Image (spheres, rainbow, N blue to C red):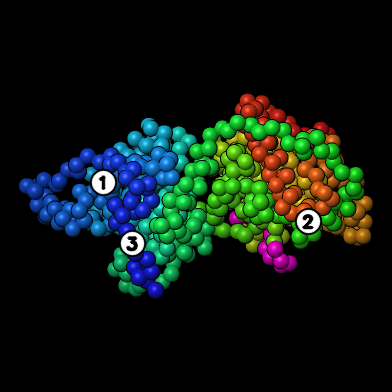
Amino acid sequence: MSADTRVQHLTARELIASVLDAGSFSSWDSPAPVPDPRTHPAYAEVVRRAREKSGADESVLTGEGRIHGRRVAVIVSEFTFLAGSIGSAAAHRITAAVQRATAEGLPLLAGPASGGTRMQEGTPAFLSMVDITGAVRAHRQAGLPYLVYLRHPTTGGVMASWGSLGHVTVAEPGALLGFLGPRVYEALYGEAFPPGVQTAENLFDKGLIDAVVPPEHLAGIIDKALAVLLAGSPEPPAAPSTVSVLPGTQTAWESIIISRNRRRPDLRRLLAHGARDVLPLNGTGQGEKDPGLLLALARFGAQPCIVLGHQRPRQAGESAMGPASLREARRGMKLAEELGLPLLTVIDTAGADLSPDAEEGGLAGEIARSLHDLIGLASPSVSVLLGQGAGGGALALLPADSTIAAQHAWLSPLPPEGASAIVHRTVDRAPEMAEAQGVKVAALVGRGVVDHVVDERPDAADEGRAFCERMAVAIEYELARVRRLPAEDRLRRRAGKYQAGG
């Protein structure tokens, strides 16, 4: 089924009316200039007919309005005006709108639908994509959200500039999205472009966009994103009861066995029972998607954060965390820094993917780069040892200003069976190795690695929702606490927290 028959594609004004609160839109646009008919008679006539057909004076509309009461700037393409193409007047309008949104401290929603550069204006119009990109870059560097809704179709220079720079990017169902339009491809190469490649759904599957959302659901998605991105610095909560919890007395091996229970709450359940305004993000944004990691915006209580953590395989044989997971994690780290949000990492892994694909994908290098980025992260950070914590895959998400551990979580260089096999040439001494290596929470508290313990009563698998709610309160408290620490102190303490012999 073609994109055109799957959904009804809205005009710019229809999309604005659908997304913004009723009656809240205010245009920022001055009348667009008309090409001089004395020097460009054919082009002037083309523009005249485009205005008549579309009811718009240019291929983009800009302005501001409110989404669920929150003030937002908008830039929306009008595809019926020369296929939404970008000439000098449209480029100037876009750049001016981005700059105004930045100056006024507004989040910006872009809704492109365009064939790209306006061919009648040639290279000067083509070069204007650089100017637009520079304005978007300045907006992002100011710590302001830039949200993109890709509409049918978005191709060419628009897709390769302001259409692909969103902090969060969602797309219209069935939308044609790509760099080279299929008609151009066929004209150049004499054959049709392979079907199904340049679709919103395929881009989602490849980790290039975060969601596929019909227009009528867009306002809700934007509201949820901005509830996190614009939450500010809420008042800190009172200290929870868990701040006085001491590590349990169980042996390391007893905790390891408990942590491997498949009914044990995982990151999905923690978010479901303990967080709100959860908005999952998808993939690296660069063509990779790995089921081993979950990335999301969320709030714990009133505290906003970027969440990234291990997704425990639900069934035996499912893939473990690979290098693409860590590239997705580093996307989350960059988002946290750019938007000034705390970062929450959640560790729950039996080990990273051990496969030829993982080796060739640069797993070791991605672990190193993840550690590098977390140690120097400009944003405040909290890590959570939720369950298993084996190997480099666990270490890659550990460095933080504060670390919370569930009572039966653990951290080790290898699963204890592997350590036993190396040292004793048998897995039978795994319990002994686990105790000797100091993997359990009591040892990690003693070393100063774990700062806050959340008790299990007596096993999180038997009290899933209650445990998640208790953990969420601890997370809210620690997020608020590390936000109040001066940046220099945070970075210095974080760098010294993992010293050998400490």
- Tell me which amino acid carries mark 2: Ala
Q: Label 3 to label 2, Cα distance in Å?
A: 47 Å
Say whether disc 1 or disc 2 marks the residue closer to the N-terminus: 1
Front position in the image: 19 or 393: 19
Per the rendered image, the range of residues in magenta is: 314-324
Residue 130 in view of the camera: no
Q: Nearer the viewer, mark 3 or mark 2?
A: 2
- Residue under label 1: 90
Q: Residue 156: percent from the left, percent from the top?
A: 34, 56
Say whether disc 3 or disc 1 marks the residue closer to the N-terminus: 3
- Residue under label 3: 9
Q: Residue 56: percent from the left, percent from the top?
A: 21, 51
- Tell me which amino acid carries mark 1: Ala
Residue 66 in view of the camera: yes
Q: Label 1 to label 2, Cα distance in Å?
A: 57 Å
Residue at 17%, 53% in the rendered image: 51
Q: Residues within 10 Å of mark 2 (few under 14, many from 20)?
A: some
Q: Quadrant of the C terminus?
A: top right
In the visual, does 341 lie left or right of 237?
left
Q: Residue 198: percent from the left, percent from the top?
A: 41, 64
Residue at 28%, 41% in the rendered image: 27
- Residue under label 2: 461
Which picture quadrant has residue 104? top left
In the visual, does 500 lie left or right of 81?
right
Q: Nearer the viewer, mark 3 or mark 1?
A: 3
Say whether disc 3 or disc 2 marks the residue closer to the N-terminus: 3
- Tell me which amino acid carries mark 3: His
Q: Quadrant of the N terminus?
A: bottom left
Q: Secondary structure at mark 3?
A: loop
